[in-house]
Amino acid sequence: MVKKKVPDWLNSSLWSTTTTTTTTTPSSTADDDHLQPYSRLSTNSPTKATESPIEPPVPVPPPAVIREDPPPYSSKPEIRAKDKDKDSRNSVSSNSNDDSDRNDKDDDNGTSVSAEDISRQAQLLTELSRKVVNMREVRRIASQGIPDGPGVRSTVWKLLLGYLPPDRSLWSSELAKKRSQYKHFKEELLMNPSEITRRLEKSSGCENDEPKYESGMLSRSHITHGEHPLSLGKSSIWNQFFQDTEIMEQIDRDVKRTHPDMHFFSGDSSMAKSNQEALRNILIVFAKLNPGIRYVQGMNEILAPLFYVFRNDPDEEMAACAEADTFFCFVELLSGFRDHFCQQLDNSVVGIRSTITKLSQLLKEHDEELWRHLEVTTKVNPQFYAFRWITLLLTQEFNFADSLHIWDTLLSDPEGPQETLLRVCCAMLILIRRRLLAGDFTSNLKLLQNYPPTNINHLLYVANKLRARPSV
């Protein structure tokens, strides 16, 4: 067999740092990660060794949009103190990261908004102000990352997901129609069966307004078999309600666990409780409208970035309608990945195992030496780490701000996010190739299940390089 040549850009000095072992607590075993059915989507990640607490990098708005009085909802991911400890791994010594030199530069530049970011934001605002938005240009600009600004990311994501049409004159009518439709969904699907029965009685009572009295007693309301709480019929609203209860309880548990390190999603504040309620409503409505999938643990993690971005829109009307807007964008986003959440399709050509196989093949094409070491020599099955990477769209591998940046690129792909996602996952492996080549099964599995901090811009640069066919 002829060994494929490693591309020249992989022989950069970036990969020449020596390898050291960072201290981590043991993560879940490969079997635990692979054999648990859909509890494998659980987002409880192992605790990492903490360094000295530092403020995690978050996007900073450009000077032109700085306000003296901050809005009720900050445009930056608000991180709790304990998350500062968790994300202090961004200050890990250079030997623990193959891309340390670039990270240092990125950290130095992260304290101020670059001229490139300001320019990119100005370009996006210009495109968004056109009567008919040029989607090709918006995708090109957004794929490089959307700078924080006055609702730019919120509007661009809605365009990229097809929720808003390119013609701006249609925005108001489309938004009004969709929001009204979501309100109808909630009224119909989140109603307690007792309320449904009461309304049925009220409507039937209107047909015959004459009250019936027997021996001075009001007549007993007639309850059909399907409306009785003890009915086991498939058409019974009560039977369906009790079947939904288990899913609703799972949704409630997962929503409460969503980003516990962020005040926006967690805590006893009215803001956090209101946001949790919105997430809960969206997931319940989705589950009832999609009986083939219903709810799978981990969907809350995909929903969170969308709701966070839309709820933090500086436009008060847009922020107030974030729940409805998030629902439809969530449906659109999941439409490209829904088969990954259907366990019956796991082994089909559209299932999650087929997608993981594509990732394996992509790595083999671009770096056969690394592929052979992982899958043949050390026998690290890609399902042990890539299952979570792919199903949760990398939301658990990076801090929240970096995840939003990655999503800018994923959503900008006109062919859909899956191919870009696979290239990003492959780039993640290549960026730490020297550590992986030096490791055995145990150390490599721990490394891949606890991916080290990296320069997101460089990660996306390498992923974009993988679009080209590898040289033989």
Image (cartoon, rainbow, N blue to C red):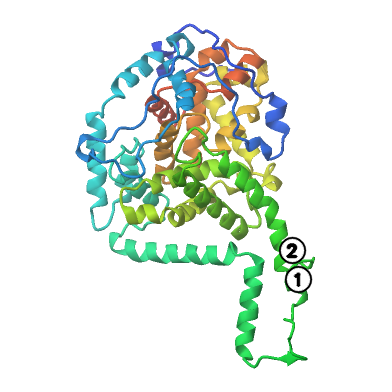
List the single residue furthest toward the left.
Answer: 64
Query: At label 1, which amino acid type do we have?
Result: His
In the picture, measured across the screen, residue 118 lies left or right of residue 24, that is left
Q: What is the x, y in percent for residue 230?
A: 79, 66
In percent of the image, x 73 and y 33: which residue is there?
A: 35
Disc number at residue 239? 2
Query: Tag 1's secondary structure?
Result: loop
List the single residue furthest toward the bottom.
Answer: 210
Q: Is residue 415 visible?
A: no
In percent of the image, x 50 and y 52: which residue is there?
A: 278
In the picture, measured across the screen, residue 66 lies left or right of residue 377, that is left
Q: How many marks?
A: 2
Q: What is the x, y in percent for residue 426?
A: 51, 28
In percent of the image, x 58 and y 48: which residue is there?
A: 338
How far apart are the alpha carbons under marks 1 and 2?
Answer: 9 Å
Query: At label 2, which amino acid type do we have?
Result: Asn
In percent of the image, x 32 and y 53: which residue is there?
A: 316
- Decide: few, some or many residues near mark 1? Use Cα within 10 Å; few <14, some 14-19, many ≥20: some
Q: What is the x, y in percent for residue 113?
A: 26, 29
Name which quarter of the figure residue 257 lies in. top right
Q: What is the x, y in percent for residue 121?
A: 26, 40
Please give the residue where the numbered disc 1 appears in the rendered image.
228
